[in-house]
Image (cartoon, helix red, strand yellow):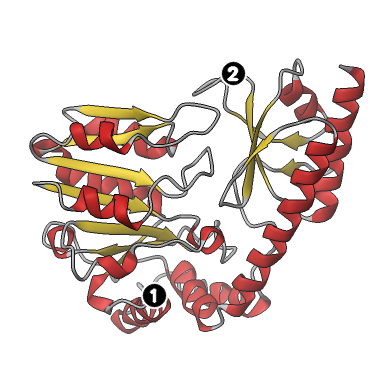
Amino acid sequence: MKSIRLDKNEMPYSPPQKVVKAAKEGTKDLNRYSSVEQAEKLRELLSNYSNVPKERIIFGPGSDLLLQEIIRVFSPARRIVTVSPSFFPTVEAAKKYGKELIRIRLTPPEFDLDLDSLLDKLEGPSLVVIDNPNNPTGKLLVEKEEALAILKSTNTLLVVDEAYYEFSGVTFSSLVEEYSNLAVTRTLDKAFSLAGARLGYLIAGKDFLESLAPSGTYFPKPSLLAGIEALKDTGYAEKNVNLVMEEKKRVKASLANIGIQVRPTSTNFLLFNTELPDTVRKLREKGIFVNDLSYRWLSWYIRVTVGKPEENDIFLTEIRDSVCSG
């Protein structure tokens, strides 16, 4: 049986054929760099999609690498403040480059962010990095008023990772013009079905633009052309997002029916905890891969990406069998 990957928060649906065709077109002359015109076209489309001036856009090979670059550039002169748990590559970059790392714990079962505690840590130059919605909890941690409280703190830069923006519908990109100390990272990996293309982008305030390198012309041509084609028709991604969110409701209800409590999420994944022994191992033996958070975070917590209905049915069958046998 083919493996079912429900562990990486990918979109289960392939990109449309015109996007695949565009990517293939980019492989025809791999001895040549992509052109300035192609790079500018992508920036223009990202600008229109995000409703911000194109001068605010920096794109790169995945939002995780953009986040790492921000941390590398700004951490020597600033303490880094983030939440725990958080997107793992961000935490690893902060550990590697940061001279001081402060992590504000999200306590189960609600995983609320203690804003007062965070604000208390902003003594001196600080770089705050928050994934909103959070990965792996799926929770929206900050609303506009809370983001403004952070932005108004003295000598503080705020980066909001909006990798799941299309699923949550919540963004702070409109604040970038007014607040030079704000940056928002996003990706085409998730909603646009382009995880294999690795295309992320930054919507940057002036304080970030002054220190970060602009988007390079030498971005891989297949990824660049795929991104351009995908952004010409955002309706395809919107349709798939709606399919996933409806399917998420069904999977959540099915898990609830067998006594598994699922946490509310604003993403394309579910979070639940279960004390059924060896759940992850048993699923893996059946070729079903989910994300076991026990090693990096809390015991018994499992994060599951919403797949296609037929994939989710197989997952649910195995979970039911575990409950009955447990």
Q: What residue sits 7% from the left and 36% below the top?
A: 124
Query: Does residue 271 appear to the left or right of 31 in the view shown?
Result: right
* Relative vertical location of residue 292 with respect to residue 166 in this rendering, above or below: above
Coordinates of residue 232 in the picture (x, y in percent): 51, 83
Q: Is residue 216 visible?
A: no
Q: What residue sits 84% from the left and 37% below the top?
A: 257
User: Mark 2 and mark 1 in contact (Cβ < 8 Å)?
Assistant: no
* Image quadrant where residue 75 sits: top left
Query: Does residue 132 appear to the left or right of 37 in the view shown?
Result: right
Quadrant of image for the C terminus: top right
Coordinates of residue 291 in the picture (x, y in percent): 62, 33
Query: Does residue 54 appear to the left or right of 309 in the view shown?
Result: left
Coordinates of residue 271 in the picture (x, y in percent): 63, 37
Look at label 1 and name its amino acid: Leu
Check residue 299 in the rendering and tell me which mark sits there, or answer none.
2
Q: Secondary structure at mark 1?
A: helix
* Image quadrant where residue 190 sits: bottom right
* Image quadrant where residue 323 sits: top right
Q: CA distance from mark 1 to mark 2?
A: 39 Å
Check residue 29 in the rendering and tell me which mark sits there, or answer none.
none
Check residue 46 in the rendering and tell me which mark sits there, or answer none.
1
Q: Nearer the viewer, mark 1 or mark 2?
A: 2
Look at label 2 and name its amino acid: Ser
- Whichever of labels 1 and 2 marks the residue nearer the N terminus, that label is 1
Q: What residue sits 38% from the left and 53% below the top?
A: 143
